[in-house]
Amino acid sequence: MKKIINAVDQVEEQMVDGMLKAYPQYLKRVDGTNVIVRAKKKTDKVALISGGGSGHEPAHGGYVGTGMLDAAVPGAVFTSPTPDQIYEGIKAVATDKGVLMVVKNYTGDVMNFEMAADMARDEGIKVEEVVVNDDVAVDGSLYTVGRRGVAGTVFVHKIAGAKAETGASLKEVKAIAEKVIANVRSMSMAIRPCTVPAAGKPGFELGDDEMEIGIGIHGETGTRREKLRSADEIVDILLEKILADLDYSNSEVAVMINGCGATPLMELFIANNRVADVLKDKEINVYKTFVGEYMTSLEMEGFSISLLKLDDELKKLLDERADTPGFKII
Amino acid sequence: MKKIINAVDQVEEQMVDGMLKAYPQYLKRVDGTNVIVRAKKKTDKVALISGGGSGHEPAHGGYVGTGMLDAAVPGAVFTSPTPDQIYEGIKAVATDKGVLMVVKNYTGDVMNFEMAADMARDEGIKVEEVVVNDDVAVDGSLYTVGRRGVAGTVFVHKIAGAKAETGASLKEVKAIAEKVIANVRSMSMAIRPCTVPAAGKPGFELGDDEMEIGIGIHGETGTRREKLRSADEIVDILLEKILADLDYSNSEVAVMINGCGATPLMELFIANNRVADVLKDKEINVYKTFVGEYMTSLEMEGFSISLLKLDDELKKLLDERADTPGFKII
Amino acid sequence: MADTAKVIKILKCISAKIRENEQFLTDLDAAIGDSDHGINLARGFKKVDEKLPELADKDIGTVLKQTGMALVSTVGGASGPLYGTAFMKAGAAAAGKNEIDIDDFLVLIEEAIGGVKLRGKAERGEKTMLDAMIPAAGAMKEERSKGADVKNILEAGVRAANEGVEFTKTIIATKGRASYLGERSIGHQDPGATSFTILLEAIEEEF
Amino acid sequence: MADTAKVIKILKCISAKIRENEQFLTDLDAAIGDSDHGINLARGFKKVDEKLPELADKDIGTVLKQTGMALVSTVGGASGPLYGTAFMKAGAAAAGKNEIDIDDFLVLIEEAIGGVKLRGKAERGEKTMLDAMIPAAGAMKEERSKGADVKNILEAGVRAANEGVEFTKTIIATKGRASYLGERSIGHQDPGATSFTILLEAIEEEF
Ligand SMILES: Nc1ncnc2c1ncn2[C@@H]1O[C@H](COP(=O)(O)OP(=O)(O)O)[C@@H](O)[C@H]1O
Ligand SMILES: Nc1ncnc2c1ncn2[C@@H]1O[C@H](COP(=O)(O)OP(=O)(O)O)[C@@H](O)[C@H]1O
Ligand SMILES: [Mg+2]
Ligand SMILES: [Mg+2]
Ligand SMILES: [Mg+2]
Ligand SMILES: [Mg+2]
């Protein structure tokens, strides 16, 4: 394992420290925890809280700020945070309007966030939850725990965050978050695995001519292994699955080409070149494109494509100002 | 070589295509070239043009937009663009106020940009040039061609871009660019090399326990090879050299922690954690910090630290609005 | 019979064994999960270790409940709430007790299983820790009904748990992270079933 | 004696040889540069190849000038302006000529070297292409002054260029990218000196 770190049991703490020291104008820590909240608490709006394992930077700490999250709760690398930490986060940002938890659909995340919500409700805090499940790699069938939440989560943060900023009610903010969830689909692939620092070795090995299709964001293998193909062919594989899952015909979409952590931007742009062409061909109109690292998996190399189907309401909220370390809309 | 690409001789073109398709609201191409210019030409200001080899994304195309560049000219991977392409860029953005070329100090870049400037001057266009040389890894002594230009260049784009946006004269914009150059220093290291697509193999090999100190941004080896050390020790090595080169005492600085292309953000934040501590210790006040990938080297893993010494004028210009795909100040 | 001191001794033994197996459990999780099960549990039982000294004069219910709470607040992931709930449920069933015998123990195990099922919405046969827990509890109850002694009962439990682990290799996961792999999860043993078996082995050694 | 047809034949041979050596030159550049010298020149001479057919009825000066312009507009990096300038300067010196002899050729080489020196602000001994060019020109001039024939003159040039390449292994680079390496550049031959030697070998073969 080769990493620029100090000690495997310090990565999460020092990462949060480094993030806070980089962005004091945006972020501060809830004392005695790793919970990241806005430097200035906003009290007149629904509070948005999200979180998950560390290793997905800039998610989620990087999305705390105007127009997006109020708190982010990072767990250990790839491990859902514990209920007590989430509870501290909820308490720190709760307002009279209530708290919306944006949770990604993993057994651990859902259980830990729900335990925290129960604790907060016992204190009289209004807490609601949405569960993001945009990854079409796995069937949402009876035989799984449903689709995973991946990069599409960033669209939920953005749009629900913009809605919350308007002073909307908890019910309204939750409804718009659910609308985003209903309309966003993603799929990923990787050509190089990553190593959980404390594990010391990669989650899987890949031959020089192999790729994994249908990976998640926790360094796990995908749904199948194949010979490496060209960027265009890879895009076609991912898009086919996404477009088969939701009817995007004649619609406008926001596109996110998300790098897994070690993917050069050059390769993401080459992928986007094909994505744009295919969508044009299918008469799906691209309203806005985001290319970069939004929801990573440590130093994994690969990318995901997310398509969010838009209507006027979603477009308007997507365009609202956002000012966070990891995501800015001017 | 394992990359998400289609063909080695198409990477530059498809990268530019993918970038333009992602950001039509910001960027367009000068017909028949790979030159990237603002979607809407600004005519009432000095035009800023930069460029260099491809493989440094988001540099430089990602910095075209309000408050930064007017044109970016990408060459082949790690290869300075040719004079005719630069000349097309100059012609496309030239205004009555003139054109400032921001060139990084490499023999090839300097020669190609100067040849283009001569061609443009023959057409009656006012062209001036600044040469960025922020890399303290190599002595600026008689025995080299002077220090290289690396990530500090982004500060030049930002601050000269803000100045140009005010309608300042070519002389004034050039003067502020030179002020930034005089006050910025950088140094880099890597733990993993990168592969120029057409070359097909990495520029160098590194053992599992080795790192290169003092690398540039073109996948080359550094000034020395060492055993890999902790993030904190690495930061200390880089900072020591930077702080020895320019007197930062009692000053305010902007910090850039720049990933080389495949460095997870987690590791950059861990590095920043130490940078912030050391600067605090030395009573150097951090005014603003930028952590991310600003000037990359394909899929190299490593990072650079840049410190820009600020005065009130530079602070003000640094804080001005910038709206480009790769760099936003709200 | 086990008093608080013995329960604490058992917990220490569990903790030691889990921590010894940190890399093994993490490697199992790498194959069909996200490479953290051993790391998670090791972190959790380290915390339990730290907490045990101050529980020496508490009743067994409190010891188990505090163990569960320590796990919930340090392990994270799926196994944190699940093991945490298991210990908290067992603690609730042992509330106020200063001694437990093998019959009490079998009740605690049932309670723990109930907690895991409820929290994780899973059943036997989904390739989770339940595939070791449920057969182990069943085998122990059967031995008990045959009038076997403590040692034999626990041995039967460990044997059944191990068989459960083996069984997990043959099935597709339909709960937890491994379920995303579909057919690819076949051939790999479940990390959680394995960690439960290690835990039961520690109980067998020390009860 | 060389007419336009022969010059074009020589340029084709240069192009073929450079393109054959693309990987070799790139590997040399990987050691002390940025892994692109062969790629850059191959791209440039491919363009030259494409342009040559339309130059068949032009004078030698035009052919060389167009070659230089093709290189300048396709090679990029340091070698693009340098080789481009070299050919353009030679072209200027051959302006209007439809035939050149060995004396003309020696003048063109001198002009080319002057162009490279001026453009790159370098001298002999800085570990650049000049370390092959300057000794080669010197050796050819000397052979010429001894009254040697064309073949011997060009052979002497190639020999001196090769010695120049060997010499670059022994010195520290003080110009170009390799200068950043300091002492680490010792032991490696300069890619540009090598490509010039290949180019001169093609001239020797075809002149
Ligand atoms: N719904 C569930 N019910 C019971 N056990 C489960 C469930 N989901 C997961 N598990 C258990 O948790 C184990 C994984 O734990 P761990 O790796 O610590 O958490 P995570 O999956 O969040 O990374 C699995 O091996 C499985 O035994
Ligand atoms: N100032 C200079 N004068 C003469 N030759 C130079 C100079 N700088 C570089 N070179 C030559 O250029 C070669 C490198 O060319 P190339 O790799 O194509 O460009 P770059 O260095 O821009 O990547 C070197 O090997 C050297 O021979
Ligand atoms: Mg996990
Ligand atoms: Mg180059
Ligand atoms: Mg796990
Ligand atoms: Mg080179």
Image: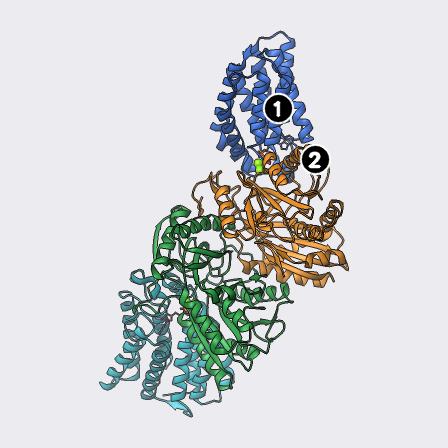
Chain colours: A orange, B green, C blue, D cyan
* Disc ID at residue D42: none
* Disc ID at residue C88: 1
For mark 2, what is the residue?
A124
User: Toward the viewer: C111 or A207?
Assistant: C111
Give the structural element (helix, strand or loop) at label 1: helix
User: Toward the viewer: A210 or C13?
Assistant: C13
Mark 1 and mark 2, same subunit? no
- Label 1 crowd (10 A; few <14 / some 14-19 / many >=20): many
Dividing the image into four equal quarters, which quarter contains ligand 5?
top right
Q: Is residue C167 above or below residue D57?
A: above
Q: What percent of the width, then of the height, locates residue B195?
A: 46, 58
Three-letter residue code for mark 2: Gly
**Residue positioned most to the bottom:** D96
Q: Quadrant of residue D161?
A: bottom left
User: Toward the viewer: C107 or A315?
Assistant: A315
Can see residue A226?
A: yes
Q: What percent of the width, then of the height, locates residue C42?
A: 51, 30
**Depth-wise, is mark 1 or mark 2 nearer the camera?**
2
Can see residue C189?
A: no
